[in-house]
Image (cartoon, grey):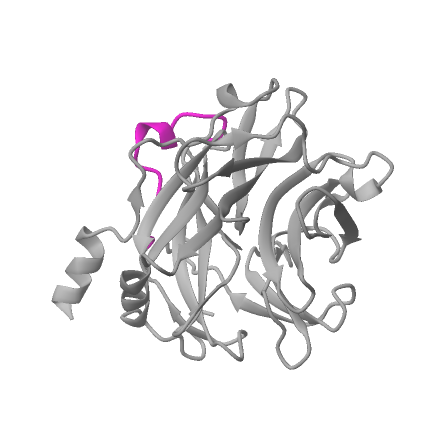
Amino acid sequence: MEKESNFKRHHPLFRRYEKNPILSPEQWPYPVNAVFNPGATEVDGETLLLVRVEDMRGFSHLAIARSKDGKTDWRWEPHPALEPDRNAHEERWGLEDPRIVWLDERGEYAITYVSFSSSGPLVSLALTQDFKKFTRIGPIVPPEDKDASLFPRRFNGRYALIHRPIIRGEGDIWISFSPDLRHWGDHRVLIPTRPGWWDCHRVGLGTQPIETPEGWLIIYHGVRVTASGSIYRVGLALLDLEEPWKVQRRSDEWVLGPRKPYEQLGDVPGVTFPSGAIFEEKTGELRLYYGITDTTVGLATADMDQVLSFLLSCPSPTAGEPHG
């Protein structure tokens, strides 16, 4: 077991792309302050990132960048894809942090994102088939709530949503269920914070859930508040394939955290915030797109077999322990 622990400590699962950051505000086709926290998917054989873009007023909208290999030669659309609807109370202060899943039975993409209302952040939903026309469903859970994604398929006829409400001041990851994408219930804590650990103050979903033979891969962020500010690091969990409210494994260690100079310099230093991922089945490569210091977009890659092997070596949560 000691050898396994050393492997996990000294051989990072995720390798930063050598040309990070891959997207920056200087590249954008119109003046912006920051580009970060993108949702990721594949459309027409290309990687599509739906990027949170903060304008020079401090409000965010969502914009599209595309690449054939998901790493280089990015192309930016000249106009925002989704902008705040000033007539909608929940979108008064902007749109943030999208996650994307393909709903095969509906034949469309589902985008969960944070709408910032005057009452606080809440989770909203939009649907699209082509990322040109969007159907806004609107808010699906009340504030304060964020860091949300649907699962790409239903369970016993119900849609499932991972999200992060603030309940009694606590920032745990929850799971909820719905028959129709509008009415949500059966709420329960999925992944709680762990007092004293690296993810002791808040946890939140990172990327969309990724289905694997071993279970649903969950990439999440954990926050520890220090004397010099909050540190956002990345952890992993594995959920049961058919009963996703059951946490099978959870990493004790973080697998990615702010280390490089570009992860320490920006609007919010010390932030590595995963929000989108793409798994290439042919190569086994997992591409993780993450926000850097609320300013730019970074890329880290991993071998999926190694990720799953690592997770299967992690503890199985037991009743009463802060693992989920």
Asked whether, in this view, residue 236 is left or right of residue 78, the answer is left
Relative height, residue 152 to residue 69 (above, below): below
Q: Which residue lies furthest to the right in this view?
A: 87
Relative height, residue 108 to residue 317 (above, below): above
Along the line of sight, which residue is nearer the eye, 48 or 125? 48
Residue drawn at the location 51% of the way across and 62% of the way down: 209
Is 141 magenta? The answer is: no
Residue drawn at the location 47% of the way across and 70% of the way down: 324
Asked whether, in this view, residue 52 is left or right of residue 179, the answer is left
Residue drawn at the location 27% of the way across and 68% of the way down: 309
Relative height, residue 49 to residue 149 (above, below): above
Image location (x, y in percent) of residue 273 = 46, 43
Number of callouts: 0
Task: Note whether residue 322 is visible.
Answer: no
| Viewport quadrant of the N terminus | bottom left
Considering the whole magenta stretch, tell me its main secondary structure: loop
Is 264 magenta? The answer is: yes
Image location (x, y in percent) of residue 245 = 54, 74
Relative height, residue 69 to residue 138 (above, below): above
Image location (x, y in percent) of residue 196 = 38, 56
Asked whether, in this view, residue 84 is left or right of residue 165, the answer is right
Image location (x, y in percent) of residue 234 = 40, 50
Task: Note whether residue 65 is visible.
Answer: yes
In the image, which residues are magenta? Answer: 254-268
Q: Which residue lies furthest to the left in this view?
A: 3
Along the line of sight, which residue is nearer the eye, 129 or 127? 129
Residue drawn at the location 74% of the way across and 65% of the way down: 181
